[in-house]
Amino acid sequence: MSFLQETPADERRRAGLRRMRTLATGLLVLAAVVYVVTLRLDHAGVWGYVNTAAEAAMVGALADWFAVTALFRHPLGIPVPHTALVKKRKDELGRSLQEFVADNFLTEEIARDRLATAHIAERLGAWLAEPSHRQRVLTEATRGGTRALERIEDHDVHDFLSQLLLPRLAQEPISPIAGSLLEGVVEGGSHKGIVDLGIDEIQRWLTDNPDLFKQVVGDKAPWWTPEWVDDKVIDWTYRQALTWLDEMRHDADHPARTALDDLLTRLARDLQHDPEVMASAEALKERLLAHPQVPTSAVAVWQSLRTSLMGAMADEGSYFWRRGDELLTHLGDHLEHDAVWQERLETHLGEIVAFFVNTYGDELAEVISVTVERWDADEASERIELFVGRDLQFIRINGTVVGALAGLAIHSLSVLIA
C-alpha cells in the first residue's frame, strides 16, 4: 500500500527535474565533445588550455553525478558501497529529522518567539474589523451550533439527567457549596443588582396597577369598616409602599437592605456550619431531585431553549446576530488598538502553545519518524528526489564549471613552471 499520494504539483516538480538533469548532462556531453575534438590538436597553444579544461570539466561532472546519484540509487545499477543512501538509511534519516525538528523547532522558547513576532492579536483585530469577516465568523458559528443542537436527541438529554447528572447531584452535599457561593455573592455585593431589579419591577407594577392593588388590599379589609375609611387606608398604604420602595431603591444603607444582607449572610453561614440547616437543605435537595417530573420538566425547558436558539441562529436579523456582530466589533477594535488586550491574548496563547510544545512536542515530532518508516524505500527515495533533485542538479552543473576552471588553473601553472 502506498502512503505517498501524488499531487498536481508533483508533475511540475518532475518536469523541472528532467530539465535540470538534461542541462547538467548536456554540459557533460559538451565537455566530452570538446575534449575529443581538441585531443589531437596542438596543445602547445590555446588548444592545450581548452583540452585540459574540458578534461577537468568531465572529471568534475562525473564525480558530482556519482555523488548526486548515489544519494538515491546505485549509479549505473552497480551496488557500490555507500550508495543508494536514502533507501538504505530511510528510517535513520527519519529519526534524525525527528530529532532535528524536536530540538530546533518544537521548543517553548522558539514557539513563544515565533508567536510574538506573528502579532496574532493585532492581525486578528484588523481581520475582525471587516464586516464580511465578522459575517463569516457568525455564519460558521451558527452553522456549527445548529448542527450540534440538531444532533442532541431529547432522550439523550433525559438519560443524561436521570441516569448521570441528577443521581450524582443527589450524592454530592450541596449546602456547603451553596453556602460558600452565597457568601461570596454577598461579600462581593453581586446580589445588589438583583435586589435593585426586583425593587424596580415591584415599583413598576404598583405604578401601573393601582386599581388592582386597591382591590387586593380592599378584599382583606374588615366587613364592618366604612368604605370611605377603607379607601383612605388603602390609598395611604399604596403611597407608603411606593415611597418605601423608592427610598429603598436609592438608599444603599436602607434598613431593609441591611436586614436582607444580614439574612443572606446568616443563611450562607448556616448552610456551611449549622448541622440542622445543612440537613434541611440536603433533604430539600433530595426531595426535589427525586421527583419523577424533574427530568421531564428539564427536557421540556431544553426543548424550548433549543427551539429558541435555533430560530435565533437561523434569522440573520435577530438579536443573536446583531449582538454577535457588536461583540465581534468590540473585540476586534480592542485587539487592534489596545495594547493591554493584545498582551493579554498573546500571553494566553503563549501559555497554550508552551503547554502543547512541552507536553506533546516529542509525540508531534515522532510523527515524522513513524511516517517515514511506513514509506516504501524505493517510493520514498523517488519522492524525496522529486522534491530536492532539481536543486541537486546544480551541484553537477557547478562541478562541471568548477572542474573546467580548475583544469585551466592547473594547466596554466604547469606551463609557467615548465
Image (cartoon, grey):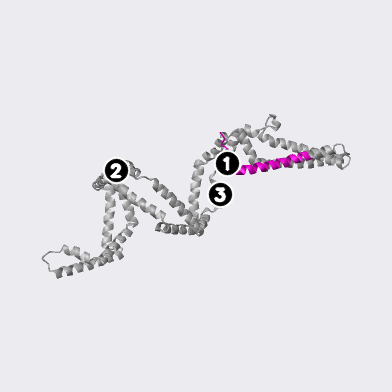
SS state under label 1 = helix
The quadrant in which the N terminus is found is top right
Where is 113 relative to 74, above or below?
below
320, above or below 16, in the image: below
Which amino acid is tagged 1? Answer: Val
Quadrant hosting residue 155: top left
Which mark is first along the chain, 1 or 2?
1
The residue segment tinted magenta is: 1-30
- Magenta span main SS: helix
Q: Is residue 161 left or right of residue 134?
A: left
The C terminus - image quarter? top right
Q: Is residue 161 magenta?
A: no
For label 1, the residue is: 101
Q: Which residue is mark 2?
A: 170
Across and down, in percent, residue 321 comes to 42, 57
> Does 106 sit left or right of 275 as displayed?
right
Crowd class of label 2 (few under 14; some 14 to 19; many from 20; radius 10 Å): some
